[in-house]
Amino acid sequence: MEASFQSLSLLSCFLLLIISLIYLSSVLLTPNRHRKLPPSPPSLPIIGHLHLLKPPLHRTLRRLSQSLGPIFSLRFGSRLVVVVSSPSVVEECFTKNDVVLANRPMFLSGKYFAYNYTSVVATPYGDHWRNQRRLMSLEIFSASRLNGSSPVRQAEIKLVLLNLCCKNSFDSFSKVELKSKFSHLSFNIVMRMITGFTANTKEAEEFRDLVREAFKLSDVANPGDFIPALRWIDFGGYEKKLQRIHGKMDAFLQGLIDEHRRDKSNDSMIDHLLLLQESQPEYYTDEIIKGLLMAIILAGTDTSAVTMEWAMTLLVNHPHVLEKARAELDAYVGQDCLIDESDLSKLNYLKAIILETFRLFPAAPLLVPRTPSSDCTIGGFDVPRDTILLVNAWAIHRDPKVWDDPTSFNPERFKNGEAIGHMLMPFGMGRRVCPGSSLAQRVVGLGIGSLIQCFEWERVSEEAVDLSEGKGLTMPKLEPLEVTCKARDIMKKILPK
Ligand code: HEM
């Protein structure tokens, strides 16, 4: 017994020695010592600054930028991370350095959710990435495609309105939970846009829940991505969780593809991709098609849902803003027919509310990480190849040097529903800017506009709804939003007779 205990301690010492040697060699042999790197706080051996990263990460990084400046560096284990938090430095990143910064770091989550880094969100900048962006644009994001799919969104939003309206909802306020409704809505919209059908099977429900889990796991601060030893031992069972979730998601997507392969009578994005597969089978493999679908579903579901939840939270906390938005809708759309997407351009105050929500609660507060494909300089500092670049959009959106009274919810700051001369970047910037921004603005605009037009909204209590943020790549509300609502007369015209 004693002998085996001794051999165990010997083994631990040996392992510790190896890890320390790896760390020392990575520090001593690294060429970074002769470079002018952005300022950095003192770090610990092996873990670097990982111990400083308390959630929510965007808040911790803003605190650090207040002492270290608009560009600073950290070590996440063995990886150098540069964080930028000022408009001028961000501008430099996405103008002078846009091409060099057009790559994404290869996190373990990308091995699974981006099909071995082949799908658009994680694939390196180049011809394959360009082709995926072109396909997405042709199939869903072009103005003509978006106009064509507008009835899908209208129909899905109508289902939410009907679902909110129960027998007594014209007479009194009743309590509803909105988070799950927004999540269903944005998932159903995206699914119908890519498959042509409503996703109301049990498998689709499960898939939607997995999307949320996937987002929780895709946080930028997974220690296994930065400390190789932790990855070898699969610290916290992280890779196993990724494998499990990916396995289920993959089976669902494969099922969709097989279904569309059997029944060729449809005209959806999947059908178009399968036609391309027939002519170029070696390029449009099932894996590539699943990767593209996964990217669209993952990137397009939670982001819009979270934004609608924050927008409604802000509105019930500011009843005078809600009142003003309702007056605008009554003046420009009325109470005879439901708002549709063509009305959105006239509704400047609604647009301002949505911009103000994007400012205060950007769904991707640190955007999506980039990495330089070669050494570059940013803000006068050296940024070596393979550094992880994080843009703290959340901090810039609340910077008092950029915005007056930055923490208050004040849609009036956006004259005519436009963000002129300000650094508002909820969808990122440069070549890898979000391709789904027009779709997202239509979904959020129509979703929030319809809720305001068709219902009166109040908080469940006198107290303001709590604004704390939960964990995850998108910035969810910590507590799901509960409010009360009462139907307006227009709902009588919408209810089936
Ligand atoms: C409120 C809604 C949304 C927000 C706030 C948002 C935000 C973002 C951000 C910040 C990025 C990274 C941009 C960069 O690196 O500069 C991104 C990328 C992306 N978004 Fe969105 N997004 C939203 C909705 C959507 C929707 C609805 C879709 C598709 C249906 C979508 C698809 C994508 C894709 C595919 C990428 C990866 C682009 C690439 O790497 O080339 N997004 N999004």
Image: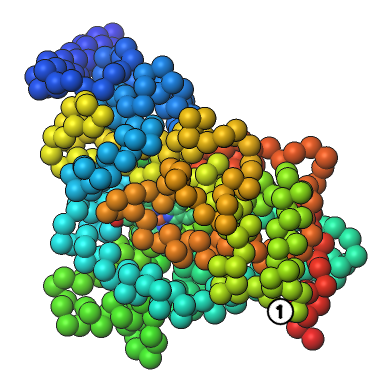
**Ligand 1 within 8 Å of the CB at mark 1:** no
| Residue positioned 31% across, 64% down in the render | 292
Which residue in the rendered view is the most extreme toward the right?
Answer: 171
Q: Nearer the viewer, residue 374 or 28?
A: 374
| Residue positioned 76% across, 74% down in the render | 335
Check disc 1 and give the amino acid type: Cys
Q: Image check: 383 left or right of 318?
A: left
Instruction: Read off the residue under disc 1.
Output: 337
Residue 313 drawn at (x, y percent): 67, 47
Residue 383 visible in the displayed image: yes
Where disc 1 sits, the SS reads: loop
Q: Quadrant of ligand 1?
A: bottom left
Q: Is residue 198 above or below residue 120?
A: below
Q: Image check: 34 left or right of 203?
A: left
Residue 249 drawn at (x, y percent): 39, 60
| Residue positioned 47% across, 77% down in the render | 147
Q: Image check: 250 left or right of 209?
A: left
Q: Quadrant of residue 291?
A: bottom left
| Residue positioned 46% across, 22% down in the render | 63
Residue 355 drawn at (x, y percent): 54, 51
Q: Nearer the viewer, residue 111 or 41?
A: 41
Q: Nearer the viewer, residue 192 or 66?
A: 66
Residue 390 visible in the displayed image: no
Q: Is residue 247 above or below residue 198?
A: above
